[in-house]
């Protein structure tokens, strides 16, 4: 009968719609929601179905990880995180600001940029060569540039304070590996996943302008 509302899912156009999807601004079926979430759908962080899925999501199986990205042969100890907390938090801040500047950034962009940087620092340590692997994505290039700028600022601050910089490339590599493991630990692994991106933004709310942790606030480093 003409005039009756369309009760089918706007994605598959077969099954009955059951829920509103803010990514498509229409009503979809639960199956399409589950299958297309963070795959073809760029789900906003406030979607209740996305939050519910994350609360009940099981850890990714080991075969979904690129073990090379985890650098399992390199230890990132709690002692290191304590001694280099300002470096680790500086990198966290740089990643968060890169994510805030580019709302299209996904977890996989962070993984790609951090992986390239880690490989570059690993080569410097092993061979002394400064080789910059090409990054084709503009978003990933901005992330890498933000990280490198932060490392340069850190070294400049050391130079100004002590007259020399003691930061080692091996320490930068460990900080990069810490964040790489963090992304892998917090992302669903789907193409449009933003679990770690949203974690970063939550660490530095938009109104927060200071990078330094207030005295007495304790460590803000969260172990992945």
Image: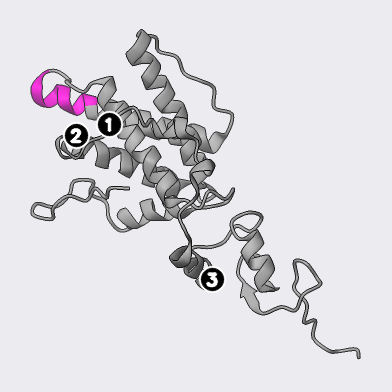
Mark seen at residue 75: 1
In the drawing, does residue 40 fall left or right of residue 160? right
Check disc 2 and report its element: helix, strand or loop: helix
- Residue 99 visible in the current orientation: yes
In the drawing, does residue 27 fall left or right of residue 82? right
Mark seen at residue 96: none
Who's the residue at 38% across and 40% down the image?
181
Asked if labels 1 and 3 touch by Cβ distance under 8 angstroms, the answer is no
The residue beneath circle 2 is 80
Q: Residue 157, located in which quarter of the rendered image?
A: top left
Give whichever of 158, 40 is nearer the camera.
40
Give whichever of 58, 36 is nearer the camera.
58
Residue 177 part of the magenta segment: no
Sort mark 2 into few (<14), some (14-19) or many (20+) by Cα contacts within 10 Å. some
Q: Identify the mark nearer the N-term, 1 or 2.
A: 1
Number of numbered markers: 3
Check disc 3 and report its element: helix, strand or loop: helix
Check disc 1 and report its element: helix, strand or loop: loop
Q: Identify the mark nearer the N-term, 3 or 1.
A: 3
Q: Which numbered disc, 1 or 2, marks the residue closer to the eye?
A: 1
Q: Identify the mark nearer the N-term, 2 or 3.
A: 3
Residue 35: percent from left, percent from top: 65, 61
What's drawn in magenta, residue-wise?
A: 155-163
Q: Residue 135, located in which quarter of the rendered image?
A: top right
The residue beneath circle 3 is 49
């Amino acid at each position: 009968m003409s005039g009756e509302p369309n009760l089918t899912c706007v994605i598959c156009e077969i099954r009955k719609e059951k829920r509103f999807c803010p990514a498509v601004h229409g009503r979809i079926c639960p199956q399409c929601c589950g299958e297309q979430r963070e795959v073809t759908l760029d789900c906003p962080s406030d979607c209740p179905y996305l939050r519910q899925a994350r609360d009940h999501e099981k850890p990714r199986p080991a075969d979904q990880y690129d073990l090379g990205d985890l650098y399992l042969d390199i230890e990132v100890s709690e002692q290191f995180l304590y001694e280099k907390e300002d470096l680790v938090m500086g990198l966290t801040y740089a990643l968060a600001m890169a994510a805030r500047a580019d709302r299209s950034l996904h977890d996989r962009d962070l993984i790609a940029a951090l992986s390239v940087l880690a490989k570059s620092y690993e080569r410097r340590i092993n061979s002394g060569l400064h080789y910059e692997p090409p990054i084709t994505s503009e978003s990933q290039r901005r992330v890498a540039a933000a990280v490198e700028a932060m490392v340069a600022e850190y070294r400049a601050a050391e130079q100004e304070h002590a007259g020399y910089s003691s930061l080692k490339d091996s320490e930068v590599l460990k900080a990069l590996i810490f964040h790489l493991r963090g992304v892998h630990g917090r992302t669903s692994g789907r193409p449009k996943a933003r679990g770690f991106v949203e974690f970063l933004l939550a660490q530095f709310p938009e109104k927060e302008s200071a990078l330094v942790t207030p005295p007495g606030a304790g460590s803000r480093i969260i172990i992945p």
